Amino acid sequence: MAKMDLAISVGEARARYFEESGFPPDGGMSQSFVAFWKLGPIPIGFPNSNARRRALQMHDLHHVATGYPPSWTGEVEISAWELATGCGGYAFAWTITLQGLAVGLFVSPIKTWRAWVRGRNTRSLYAEQFSESLLRKSVGELRRHLGLDRGVPRATLGDALSFGFWSSVALAQTAAMFALLALPVAGLAMLVRALV
């Protein structure tokens, strides 16, 4: 994501983020299904639930505030940051950030660690409800509100212990998810091969 103008509104910054990222103008909120991969002609993904939409509203604003791009590295960074700040009552956010943290441990462990420490020293919007007033704030105001306008302090023992604990939870959750999905995906792959 390009360096954000701190004086523009969060709503305008979010629109730019969607455009630069190749997302639909609503960020995909209106989609009924989220496909992240294809198995031949069959899209693999999940329904775009209300819980996902609710978390996505805040997640997109977090991208704007933190500057983490919608790339593999940026998504694992924002996962670590969001998880370290706490995801409040957003159940979908807890689930997806744990998966992102697990991926980050392998894809970009140093950036994931730095994002974790940053998150432990700032806050997220998950402690709040989405409102149009958030979109009217300037990006600079949002960054100040979340504590992102100051440098990240040195990591503490508490940062390391919490990172170790949540990394263990993330790896266990991701392993369990893959184990549960392995059989249906294997069966679907055999069905596609038989039909093609």
Image (cartoon, rainbow, N blue to C red):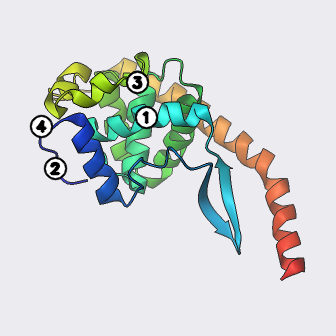
Q: Is residue 3 visible?
A: yes
Relative height, residue 46 to residue 51 (above, below): below
Q: Residue at x 41, y 26 (%)?
A: 84
Q: Position of residue 87 (x, y in %)?
A: 48, 23
Total count of labels: 4
Q: Position of residue 166 (x, y in %)?
A: 53, 28
Q: Of label 1 and label 3, which has the lower sequence position? A: 1
Question: Which residue bears the numbered disc 4?
Answer: 6
Q: Are marks 1 and 3 in contact (CB under 8 Å)?
A: yes
| Residue where numbered disc 3 is placed | 130
| Among the two numbered marks 2 and 3 on one chain, the one whose residue lies closer to the N terminus | 2
Residue at the disc numbered 2: 3
Task: Mark 4: give few (<14), some (14-19) or many (20+) Cα within 10 Å.
Answer: some
Nearest to N terminus: mark 2 or mark 1: 2
Dot in front, 3 or 4: 3
Tell whether label 1 touches label 4 (CB within 8 Å). no
Residue pointed to by mark 1: 57
- Above or below for 4 versus 65: below
Q: CA distance from mark 2 to mark 3?
A: 24 Å
Mark 3 closeness class: few <14, some 14–19, many ≥20 residues within 10 Å: some
- The reply to whether discs 3 and 4 touch (Cβ–Cβ < 8 Å) is no
**Tag 3, which secondary structure?**
loop
Q: Which kind of residue does numbered mark 4 sit on?
A: Leu
How far apart, in angstroms, are the residues tagged by discs 4 and 1?
Answer: 20 Å
Q: Name which of mark 4 and mark 1 comes first in the sequence.
A: 4
